[in-house]
Image (cartoon, grey):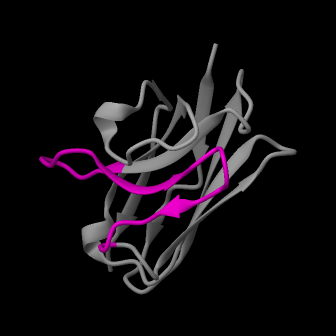
């Protein structure tokens, strides 16, 4: 059974930084792709970073490229999302997801295992 537990969400001022963590159990990161997604109030969930299991290739959409950095620690079965230069539009609930396979499209419909989410609020 796949379990994902996010942590690290907080209230942060515009321009600030935050690091989210996702602790994963029940699977191997050698076999599963992992992604970070977010959902703002009234908006659809969107992918912000996805890492392939096969070669560690990471996808970022334009909205976060250059500001967000995803990483993984296979020895701890954890993934991280380092976020910098945060803006109010980055506010939302951030979810970690996993899907079996080498490379998975970084869109929510393609992912079947989800964590409960952690809240990120960017506000002065």
The answer to whether 20 appears left or right of 45 in the picture is: right
Residue 109 % position (x, y): 29, 32
Q: Residue at x 66, y 50 (%)?
A: 79
Q: Residue furthest top?
A: 1
Q: Which residues are magenta?
A: 38-63
The quadrant in which residue 44 appears is top left
The front one of 45 and 60 is 60
Q: Residue at x 45, y 40 (%)?
A: 117
The quadrant in which residue 77 appears is top right
Relative to residue 121, is residue 119 depicted above or below? above
Q: Taken as a whole, is the magenta stretch helix, strand or loop? A: loop
Q: Residue at x 12, y 47 (%)?
A: 42
48 magenta-colored: yes
40 magenta-colored: yes
Residue 78 % position (x, y): 72, 45
Q: Residue furthest right?
A: 75
Which quadrant is home to the N terminus? Answer: top right
Which quadrant is home to the C terminus? Answer: bottom left
Residue 21 % position (x, y): 64, 52
The answer to whether 76 appears left or right of 82 in the picture is: right
Q: Residue at x 35, y 51 (%)?
A: 38
Residue 102 % position (x, y): 58, 40
The answer to whether 4 appears left or right of 113 in the picture is: right
Relative to residue 52, is residue 123 depicted above or below? below
The front one of 59 and 15 is 59
The quadrant in which residue 89 appears is bottom left
The front one of 103 and 115 is 103
């Amino acid at each position: 059974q796949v379990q994902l537990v996010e942590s690290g969400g907080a209230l942060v001022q515009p321009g600030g930084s935050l690091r989210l963590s996702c602790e994963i159990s029940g699977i191997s990161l050698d076999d599963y792709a992992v992604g970070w997604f977010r959902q703002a109030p009234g908006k659809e969930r969107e992918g912000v970073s996805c890492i392939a299991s096969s070669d560690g290739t990471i996808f970022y959409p334009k909205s976060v490229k250059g500001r967000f950095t995803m990483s993984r620690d296979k020895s701890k079965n954890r993934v991280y999302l380092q976020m910098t230069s945060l803006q109010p539009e980055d506010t939302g609930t951030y979810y970690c997801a996993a899907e079996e396979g080498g490379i998975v499209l970084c869109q929510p419909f393609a992912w079947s295992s989800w964590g409960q989410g952690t809240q990120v609020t960017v506000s002065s």
